[in-house]
Amino acid sequence: MVWASQRRKPAQQPDMRRCLVTGGAGFLGRHLVGQLLDSGRWDVTVFDVRALEGEERVQYIVGDLRDAEQVAQACKGMDTVFHVATAAPTAHNTHNEALMRDVNIGGTQNVIDACVAAAVPRLVYTSSASVVFEGKSLVLVDESQPYASRPMDYYTHTKAEAEKLVLAANGRGGVAVCALRPSGIFGEYDTLLVATTVRNAARGKLKYIIGNGRNEMDWTYAGNVAQAHIEAAEALTGPDCVLAGKPYFVTNAEPRTFWGFMGDVCQGMGYDRPHIKLPFALVYFIALVLQMVVVPLLRLVGRDMQSDFTPARIKITAVNRTFSCAAARRDFGYKPKVSVDEGLKRTMQHFEHLHASKQKKL
């Protein structure tokens, strides 16, 4: 990747905080950048592999987290670094261990080193609630829940390792750090949930409910996650403050049944809700065979099968995954401003072009 400032931004007030948002052109990053700018208190620079289109109020740095020198240059002079960028667990990336390791772990280490070298006062890291999930039900667990001893996939493993690196760096060079663990992020600009749901629903793959359908999951509107990042940064006053060196679960704090939420998305996009129940054991066995037998055989003959039908994804759909936000509420006043229903409404409006009625006209 080349290093390039894409556009000049208007002159900022001298008392504004300077922040860098890695991954600021992505899904969650766009929500965070928008809220930072709208607050009028932040001078924002975005570091990403692509520029954020349509936003004139920020400076863009096109770069790669894997390039330590690019990251080091980007962090100089910043008051806060929001490390949001990640190698997402798309069907294409799911089995790419090298990419996950190099971006999620190596890239995060580059960010830490750059913050320490530049004496950046605050580093807020976007982790994942999945770092404590290993396929078993979790019900309103708090941050005392240990890391998964057997992470479900490369993504989860690398996010956990990166979080450990960040938290261990608290106090190095005077840098104060914390990590936020959102669960089930959805909202405008998402490139995974809605697009994948629509694609599978259109192919008739979302008629089915895996298991009894009563399992609950915490879903989190992306705007609330962005809100939590800003609130955490403002409360992160030094390496000895109450939230420094700690992880925090961040959700909407209103769990929904997994299949109920998926049904809301399907219905909102013009498709039938899932309604045919399938035994979890059967579906999980098929996913295991696919991952452990079919995928390796295809690779032997030079073919690569990309699918989100994996054992890890199947377990997520059939067990409870809920988390307590009490610590975030206590330590930096987090209280989600947008409900799940309002978040879904905004999401459906944003993706109106993917509605089934629109597709039939093509």
Image: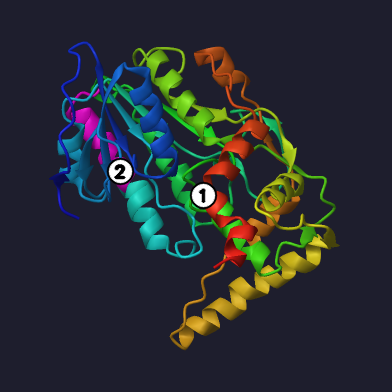
Amino acid at pointer 1? Thr
Segment colored magenta: 107-120
Amino acid at pointer 2? Leu
Which percent across, then down, holds residue 278?
A: 83, 63
Picture residue at 45% right of the left edge, 62% below the top: 93
Which of these two is toward me, 342 or 168? Answer: 342
Residue, disc 1: 156
Q: Name the image quarter holding residue 329.
A: top right
Provide the major secondary structure of the magenta segment. Answer: helix
**Quadrant of the image containing the N terminus:** bottom left
Which percent across, then down, holds residue 209?
A: 79, 57
- Dot 2 alpha-carbon crowd within 10 angstroms: few under 14, some 14 to 19, many 20 or more: many
Q: Name the image quarter holding residue 229.
A: top left
Which percent across, then down, holds residue 277?
A: 84, 60
Circle nearer the N terminus (1, 2): 2
Residue, disc 2: 52
Q: Which colour style is shown?
A: rainbow
